[in-house]
Image (cartoon, rainbow, N blue to C red):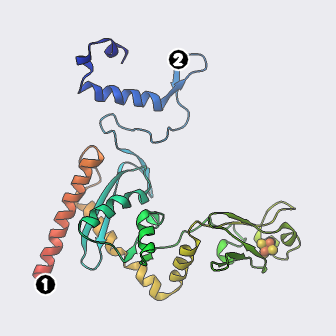
Amino acid sequence: MAWVAKQSKSCVAAPLTHYIEALAQVREQDLEPHPKGGVQIRQGVAADRRISIEDPDMRHGRKSKRFNGYKQHLSTDLDTDLVVACAVTPANRPDEESTGALQEDMAHQDLFPDVLLIDRAYLNSAMTEDVLASGGDVVCRPWRGASAKPGLFGKRDFKVNIRDGTLTCPAGEVEPFEPGAVVHFDPEACGPCKLRSSCTQAVSGKGRSVTMGDDERLQKRLRSRLQSRAGRAQLRERVGVEHRLAHLANRQGPKARYRGTRRNLFDLRRLAVVQNLEVAARYLRAS
Ligand code: SF4
């Protein structure tokens, strides 16, 4: 880089610029000053770390296992089996960030879901908010929540009253709550409580605490859906989207075909079109 910097401008013009910028980014993210002078490999991982010189967009991601590259997102009309929108994001981005692009694709077709069947990872998305704000329904599994320590009451053992904004513990103590806040039960009530050993391991003088979600109202609705047979059947309808994804993955293989988000979005749309043509052919054969 130092040598290139001394050369004339024409020497650092494209295509070299691309590599010089990549080197600068890698140096910045992977090295840090050494206490005795010079540089050393950085301890820890930089946020949004670049992992490829050739592909500036691909990132490390995690689903059930670690992977490098991109995440693909699909919107499927479950009545027709057609893929109506696609999005591609670097692997380290939260799934919920893709819904803006999906909504944009659907808006071009004047589509807006009145019932949204989604994976939990899309629950905090703008699309979920829009569907709920327009009076639509969201079908999804509720957050699992931090699992209770063995032998202790979990959050589900507490009664949430959304209308009154209160939380009632198994011993009947009531505390008000705010969405997203932590509720601390009164230590004076928890101290002599007969159920204390089944409720909290907090040190003496402290009571049980429970973390409330930002979307407690929605979570409560999702939890009650899970209790009914009809609700569970509705949740299973989303399997149609999984089938679309599985067909795409089967056709596409495990590796991204191109470098960069934009080209891989093109690839995903191309495959979705082929898939939609197959669905159309199926309808034609059946008619
Ligand atoms: S320990 Fe406190 S929060 Fe837990 S059941 Fe008893 S009074 Fe309720």
Left or right: residue 121 compared with residue 83: right
Q: Label 2 vs label 1: CA separation? A: 71 Å
- Identified at 42% across, 84% down, the residue is 233
Q: Identify the mark at residue 286; answer none if there is no mark.
A: 1
Q: Which of the two labelled residues, at mark 2 and mark 1, occupies the earlier sequence position? A: 2
Q: Quadrant of residue 190?
A: bottom right
Residue pictured at 26% horizontal, 17% vertical: 9
Left or right of residue 276: residue 219: right
| Number of marks | 2
* Quarter where residue 24 is shown: top left
Say which of 26 and 162 sits in front: 162
Q: Residue furthest front?
A: 134
Crowding at label 2, few (<14), some or many (≥20) Cα neighbours within 10 Å? few
Q: Give the residue type at disc 1.
A: Ala
- Pointer 2 with pointer 1, Cβ within 8 A: no
What element does badge 1 sit on? helix
As drawn, 21 above or below 1: below
Q: Amino acid at mark 2?
A: Gly
Q: Which mark is residue 187?
A: none
Q: Position of residue 49 (x, y in %)?
A: 44, 39
* Res 203 quadrant in image: bottom right
Q: Where residue 55 sits in the image (x, y, percent)? A: 31, 39
Quarter occupied by the N terminus: top left
Q: Which residue is mark 2?
A: 38
Binning the other alpha carbons within 10 Å of mark 1 as few (below 14), some (14 to 19) or many (20 upward) gives few
Report the front residue among 52 and 104.
104
Secondary structure of the residue carrying numbered label 2: loop
State which image quarter holds ligand 1.
bottom right
Seen in the picture, residue 264 relative to 148 is either above or below; the reply is above
Q: Nearer the viewer, residue 82 or 197?
A: 82
Note whether residue 119 is visible: no
